[in-house]
Image (cartoon, rainbow, N blue to C red):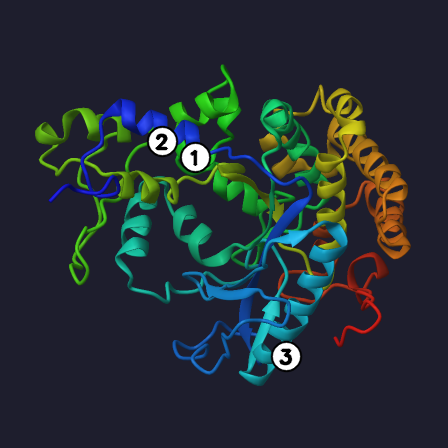
Amino acid sequence: MARSPETAGLTLVEAENWLRSSMFTASVPGRVGVEIEFLTRDASGEPLAPDALDALDRGELPAGGQITEEPGGQLEISTRVCSGLIDVVTAVAADVAELRRRSSRAGVRLLGEGTDPVHLPPRRTDHPRYRAMESYFDQYGTNGRRMMRATASLQVTLESGAAANVQRRWRLVHAIGPALVSAFANSPFVDGRDSGWASARQGIWMSLDPARTWPVPNRQPKGAPAESYLRYVLAAPVMMVPKPHPGEHGSWSVSQSFTFAKWISSFDSLGLRPPTRSDLEYHLTTLFPPVRPRGAVEVRYLDAQRGNGWVVPLAVLYALVEDAAVDDHVLQITEQTEDRWLDAARLGLHNPALRSAAIALLDAATESLDRSSAPPWIVERVVRFTDEYTRAGRCPADDLRTAGPGVPPESHPAIDAPVPQPVGVRP
């Protein structure tokens, strides 16, 4: 019986061809999805007991989102695929409100910060994936465990663009990254102390394996996006080798360092079975660049936000990427900052170039939203955030610093005001 492509051994040419055809796929303009993560606490503010999430209702959320749990007990909502900004904002608001209700009933508090400000929770799962991941990242110190258990982000998935626009959109979504990291940094604390970083979460990620956590253009600067990512994937070390048969557990860790390309070419000398397409697909799930193509494009560089603070970065990112009329202006704004990822994470808006770029980007997003069908309340919220945070050289991390680690900051309308419900939609 012939073996399926998923389970047959791969050649290098087959791997390259599959990656070229799969990483950037034809798209429907305007479709968007969100993954929004929350750190968790018990009712007294302490880390959760091992069974604390057992009582949580994980059924489908009212707008179609799904609940998943990360290794440190973080809870994540993955929305359905939405059609435009109004649809996704409405969906996130409804699903987050319902998760808050369910969490409260289960005695769980949700915390909207990019890093746990006080604790490093224990790993709550013994799945071989997370044991292997923890073992792999331990070579970079404690930040691997901290990333897995004590960080949370706001991830936005956008279409990769029509074929002719993929390269421009790919550059754009990277170019705006450092300035947006600065504007929405929300993770100054680690282990109860000020880390010295505005976005310690992004700093933690970038302290790990650069072959899998640094931006693709920094590692593979030449060529079209598909070719660059193809090289990035094949040059990344293999983190784990999953057992191929159901019920076959054991360790997935690897005892030696080798790239996926070497696994294909030298599996015999490595003492391994030949890799399959399923192995390649799984390898992709162990790569974590700030922008990750998976047919559509995942933007992974934004910190989790408190309250309804997710509204402004979501609206800004959507407007800047989806409005082709602002492309040239945006690329001009970011000429001096597009590679300054570490400065953005460490300094935030205290860096003058990043502050200037962030102000200009939020102004450009406001103009785009104003021209579009965005509800006036979204435009007003972006304007208020820009005026009272970005122009003032402040980001959400500054509110946390004022309050202190583990202390809720003062409320602010641009972050904490309710999301208006559309007529006829029950909150």
The amino acid beneath tag 3 is Arg
Residue at the image position 15 percent from the left and 35 percent from the top = 274
Residue at the image position 63 percent from the left and 72 percent from the top = 62
| Callout 3: SS | helix
Residue 18 is marked as 2
| Callout 1: SS | helix
Residue 401: horizontal and vertical position, in percent?
A: 70, 54
- Single out the mark in the foreground, 3 or 1: 1
Residue 225 in view of the camera: yes
Q: Quadrant of residue 301?
A: top right
- Disc nearer the start of the sequence (2/3): 2
Give left or right: position of 139 versus 391.
Answer: left
Residue 31: horizontal and vertical position, in percent?
A: 65, 46
For the residue pair 94 and 51, the one nearer the viewer reads as 94
Residue at the image position 59 percent from the left and 66 percent from the top = 64
- Single out the mark in the foreground, 2 or 3: 2
The amino acid beneath tag 1 is Ser
Q: Answer yes or no: do the residues labelled 1 and 2 have beta carbons within 8 Å?
A: yes
Residue at the image position 68 percent from the left and 51 percent from the top = 83
Residue 22 is marked as 1
Label 3 vs label 1: CA separation? 38 Å
Question: According to the image, label 3 marks what residue?
Answer: 101
The amino acid beneath tag 2 is Trp
